[in-house]
Image: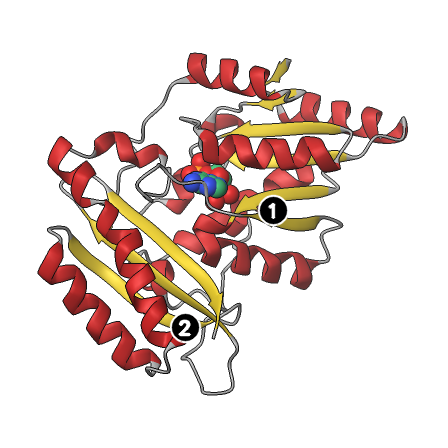
Amino acid sequence: MKIITTIKEMQQWSKQKRSEGNSIGFVPTMGFLHEGHVALMTASKQECDLTVTSIFVNPLQFGPNEDLDRYPRNIVGDEATCSAAGVDVLFYPAVQEMYPTERNTTLLATQRSDVLCGASRPGHFDGVITVVSKLFNIVLPDVAFFGRKDAQQVAVIEGLVSDYNFPVEIRAVGTVREEDGLAKSSRNVYLTEDERKDAVGLNKTLAFGKHLVQSGVAGDEAERRSIAYYNENFQGEIDYLNVLSFPALTQLNKSDAQCIIAIAVKYSKARLIDNIIFTR
Ligand code: AMP
């Protein structure tokens, strides 16, 4: 596996490989890799000739009081994970390489970004679409793979690709979970032992809410009852729990067939998110 740290070399590699007729699959990550990330790499390997993974903890998508400084890192382990997964190139740029000067322009996420994580993390999706645009122009992929665990991120990125005609196809890969249903996340290492046990509550509450909606309960009532269910049985602090249409992420109407139930919970050192996308 090749490790590339500069934008120039990354672009040159991709241009060369594309000119030789290879398709390039791309898996952007923030590192501290786990089986969820590996599932994206596997999907890319299945569909594309070559796979590039990036590791970049993007300062722009963290708010001032968020966990940028203590976001978990393990580049040595991540290299081994990428290599074992059959990744061809690991793109691992420094912050100075990605943002050397003050930017001249700003991208703003204006649709699907005022709910869920967009509402509780102002500016987060502006940072996401900025870095994803840069990475697409650096890695020059044919196909890019994102996790459904961040379903709102996938929806916002699909909007970005459509607005700016990026010649990239977006694939969404299902959420990889621990045996008890907890979605795998780099941030799970920050749970205490008790919190780790409690964190099964996210997925359990989503399943509870999904069942309500599928039995005909209206979205707002399902939200209220799911929040009550979580608070009766689990200890974390709910940041949001919403039932929305998918992929529009608007308030659920009777005519919407596809729904998402999404939750964010704050523990002492980690904020976890999860969702289920389903049909009524
Ligand atoms: P992150 O490193 O957390 O920014 O995630 C990088 C990519 O991996 C994103 O597209 C995530 O949605 C995806 N991802 C993270 N956790 C999981 C998971 N448990 N299952 C599937 N994909 C995931």
Image: 138 above or below 205 = above
Ranked by sequence position, the earlier of labels 1 and 2 is 1
Q: Amino acid at mark 1?
A: Ser
Q: Secondary structure at mark 2?
A: strand
Q: Mark 1 and ligand 1: say if the CB distance to the nearest ligand atom is below 8 Å.
A: no
Q: Is residue 147 left or right of residue 171?
A: left
Considering the numbered disc 1 on the image, is that residue within a helix, a strand or a loop?
helix
Residue drawn 59% across the image and 29% down it: 53
Residue annotated with mark 1: 133
Asked whether the viewer can see residue 138, the reply is no
Query: Residue 67: x, y in percent?
Result: 26, 38
Q: Is residue 8 above or below residue 116?
A: above
Q: Nearer the viewer, mark 1 or mark 2?
A: 2
Whether the residue under disc 2 has CB within 8 Å of ligand 1 = no
Q: Nearer the viewer, residue 230 or 76?
A: 230
Would you say 112 lies left or right of 195 here? Answer: right
| Residue at 73% from the left image edge and 57% from the top image edge | 165
Q: CA distance from mark 1 to mark 2?
A: 27 Å
Residue 162 point in image, percent of width and height: 68, 62
- Where residue 126 appears, x then y in whole percent? 46, 54
Mark 2: few/some/many CA within 10 Å (<14, 14-19, 20+): many
The numbered mark at residue 244 is: 2
